[in-house]
Amino acid sequence: MKIAVIGGTGLIGSQVVKILNAGGHEAVPHSPSTGLDLISGKGLTEAMAGADVVVNLTNSPTFDEASPAFFQTTMENMLAAAKAADVGHAVILSIVGADQVPDLVYYRAKVLQEDLLKAGPVPYSIVRATQFFEFVDAAMSWTSDETTVRLPATLVQPMASADVAQAVADVAAGAPLGGTRNVAGPEVFPLDELGRITLAARGDQRTVVTDDSAGLFAAASGNALIAGSDAVIFKTTYREFLAR
Ligand SMILES: NC(=O)c1ccc[n+]([C@@H]2O[C@H](COP(=O)([O-])OP(=O)(O)OC[C@H]3O[C@@H](n4cnc5c(N)ncnc54)[C@H](OP(=O)(O)O)[C@@H]3O)[C@@H](O)[C@H]2O)c1
């Protein structure tokens, strides 16, 4: 199949392109660096021409109040172009529990992205993944100084970006789900504990201080970010990831 991967140069997108092409598909990466801008629509008509499937793995440049407008404009442009080109399947990557954290504007933006896809004119699939292992460093950097990393004890069930990419590629190569596939990692950690494991593995002498008001993930409580019993659980553990 010919598969247009918008955001195909990003962390997940680049891996999805490789997996699909290795599986005999013709996956083409698109992004501003290849001449496609999903905000303005530049390059979109050309990207959709002849595509059987479009996969949207773009991300908003910021996680703040600007993120809903990013996902709204990009989804509206993508769906209009996909419909015009008669693309038979549109896939997006969202976040497990996105609807459970209403105080986080970025998660509200992801729910908006899902709702636009569900209400749109193209048969669709949503993959909801938990936090990527690669995202732990970013979460730590928001609330770090030279001696201390402040993290909330929010429960997370992180997974390898390679496993996320496999899940997205599997869905993109299949028939539209008309629904959502949840995917997650094999272990649940409090985020502060994950920070301690990360620093110890790197010989980083900083101390993790538990602070339930620190960073974006402070807005999630209880099991909001933990996958339900319907989720596909991938095998790669965080310690295996750190050891690589
Ligand atoms: N982080 C997590 O733990 C997590 C968990 C679950 C789901 N997700 C979702 O996973 C998705 C992919 O995340 P990621 O980390 O792979 O993102 P990423 O590495 O930041 O890559 C984003 C991609 O979007 C492209 N892009 C940005 N603006 C664009 C525009 N206006 N038009 C076309 N393409 C544009 C970028 O192109 P350039 O490289 O040219 O800028 C890049 O290819 C996101 O939607 C995110 O919400 C994330």
Image (tube, rainbow, N blue to C red):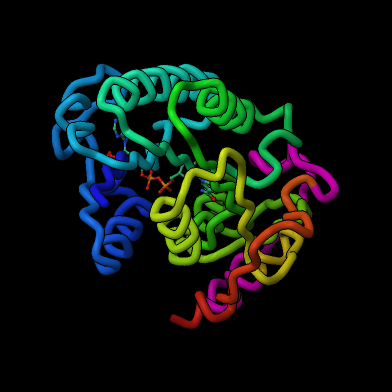
Q: Is residue 205 left or right of residue 219?
A: left
* Rendering coords of residue 2 (x, y %): 23, 48
Identify the residue shown where x is 15% and y is 39%.
34
Side of 114 relative to 102 (left or right): left
Q: Give x and y (percent) for residue 16.
A: 35, 57
Percent of width and height locating residue 153: 78, 54
Above or below residue 142? Residue 101 is above
Q: Is residue 146 visible?
A: yes
**Residue at 47% in and 17% down:** 69
Q: Is residue 209 visible?
A: no
The residue closer to the viewer here, 134 or 68, is 68
Q: Quadrant of residue 56?
A: top left
The range drawn in magenta is 197-223
Quadrant housing the C terminus: bottom left
Image position of 141 (left or right of 47): right
Residue 232 image point, x, y percent: 64, 63
The answer to whether residue 73 is above or below residue 105 is: above
Pick the front one: 61 or 204: 61
Is-magenta flag for residue 200?
A: yes
Q: How many marks?
A: 0
Residue 124 shown in magenta? no
Q: Is residue 55 left or right of residue 37?
A: right
Q: Quadrant of ligand 1?
A: top left
Name the residue located 51 percent from the left edge and 66 percent from the top edge: 160
Extreme-right residue of the structure: 222
Judge by depth and name the residue closer to the eye, 207 or 6: 6
Taking the spot 56% from the left edge, 75% from the top edge, the residue there is: 236
User: Can you tell which quarter of the image residue 33 is in?
Assistant: top left
Task: Determine which quarter of the picture holds residue 147.
Answer: bottom right
Which of 204/165 is in front? 165
Residue 137 position (above or below residue 38): below
